[in-house]
Amino acid sequence: MMDTEHLGTHISKQFNADLENLREEVLAMGGIVEEQITLALDAFTNNDSDIADKVIANEKMVNAKEMKIDEACTKVLAKRQPAAGDLRLIVTILKTITDLERMGDEAEKVARMAKAIANKEMAVANVKLHYGALLHLGNHVKKMLHDALDAFARMDVESAVNVAKLDNQADEEYNAISRQLITYMMEEPRRISEVLDFMWSARALERIGDHANNICEYVVYLVQGEDVRHKSWDEMQRLAKDE
Amino acid sequence: MMDTEHLGTHISKQFNADLENLREEVLAMGGIVEEQITLALDAFTNNDSDIADKVIANEKMVNAKEMKIDEACTKVLAKRQPAAGDLRLIVTILKTITDLERMGDEAEKVARMAKAIANKEMAVANVKLHYGALLHLGNHVKKMLHDALDAFARMDVESAVNVAKLDNQADEEYNAISRQLITYMMEEPRRISEVLDFMWSARALERIGDHANNICEYVVYLVQGEDVRHKSWDEMQRLAKDE
């Protein structure tokens, strides 16, 4: 067997091209997920079942993308046998695409809820008062995903840590929506089932924020070689200042 | 650079020992998570804040275990540069421990809800009527995790596919609990907030089942080299019959 790993710069360039290709694929997958979130929110605010169906159909694309990148990572690992930083980059990619795929699942859930609500033709006038809050949360977590992808693309620890801060805000927004909906359910017990659909959507959005946060933690781990996944936000901020 | 991969059986034995060690660590981590689920359910059924606190404290152990295995996998990848099946095993381990860690998070959520309910000293007589259903779901997903770890340990596709079947049952159990709780909330709107705590716990348990299912899908992927993560249950069953 010929040892192709040591043929010099050409191979090294090819390897860099492999890594660059993987990174671009991750960003492309992230772009699809962003679009899915946008469409799911559209379906919600416009009571549009067709848009919801589109999100549900597109979900297959997200899954296919994950499998494709997963396979490509395994191939690069087998062919290039990377060490140290390159190896960590590939492990980070494997973890990141899992989170992106889960975000896609959550966007699909939001679309399904939007469809359920649109089909019920129910008198949701009061629920609709909360659409603004839901949309705000949705846009907030979409920004988190966007910033997380940006931090990933530029390997920027400070941006990554800022996303963790945004996640705290997302949690607060979710809690506020949740409290409002509980109050509304108490006033209109017959609407509980429909309001819960609404609440699941808010929770799905909040989880998208969590996944964006996970990606940022991988970025910090990758850049600093220190595992921050289970450190507090304060510690992460300290790490960001130290670099 | 010396090609240490081809020095013969001694190196190969060391590599096997590394892989065996990783597998044992995963099973040990799985065992801790099983114990966490057991304790969280105990805290719930006995209204015991102390047990809930124990689960919350133990969560750090689960996280530490994940980081340790993650690090060990990266080291083995760098040192042994495995190919083909061995490489896929390590990628499977990296994914599996992510799911185990998330299960630990869900068990912690159940413990926190148990604590919230225990501390509220509320008149939850009617909610308690549903404890049996929650406990049943909890034991069901605990069995799923146990079987998933078993399928992982023995690399047994048929067992893995059986867990997917159990997951359908878990989803049904969760839906039944959810419907009952909605009915109860409609009858007792003042209890909505507390009943939602209960509902989140049921959902956390249902998600533990989903994660067990994920692990089984990785096992099938590993053994058959075919990605079943986004195939339907019917297709998975067909695959199990084909082997």
Image: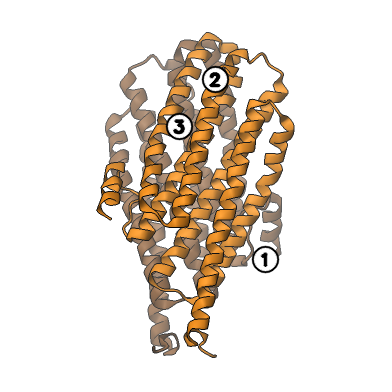
Chain colours: A orange, B brown
**Residue position for label 2:** A130
Q: Which amino acid lies under the numbered mark 2 shown in the image of this protein?
A: His
Q: Chain of mark 3?
A: B
**Mark 1 or mark 3: whose residue is earlier in sequence:** 3
* Residue A172 image point, x, y percent: 40, 29
**Residue position for label 1:** B243
**Residue position for label 3:** B201
Q: Is residue A190 above or below residue A228?
A: above
SS for dot 1: loop
At x 43%, y 23%, the residue is: A176
Is any part of residue B142 visible from this angle? no
Q: Which amino acid lies under the numbered mark 1 shown in the image of this protein?
A: Glu
Q: Is residue B180 above or below residue A218?
A: above
Q: Residues within 10 Å of mark 3 (few under 14, many from 20)?
A: many
At x 45%, y 88%, the residue is: B6
The quadrant in which residue A88 appears is: bottom left
The quadrant in which residue B161 appears is: bottom right
Q: Is residue A231 left or right of residue B9?
A: left
Q: Is residue B243 left or right of residue A186?
A: right
Quadrant showing the C terminus of chain A = bottom left
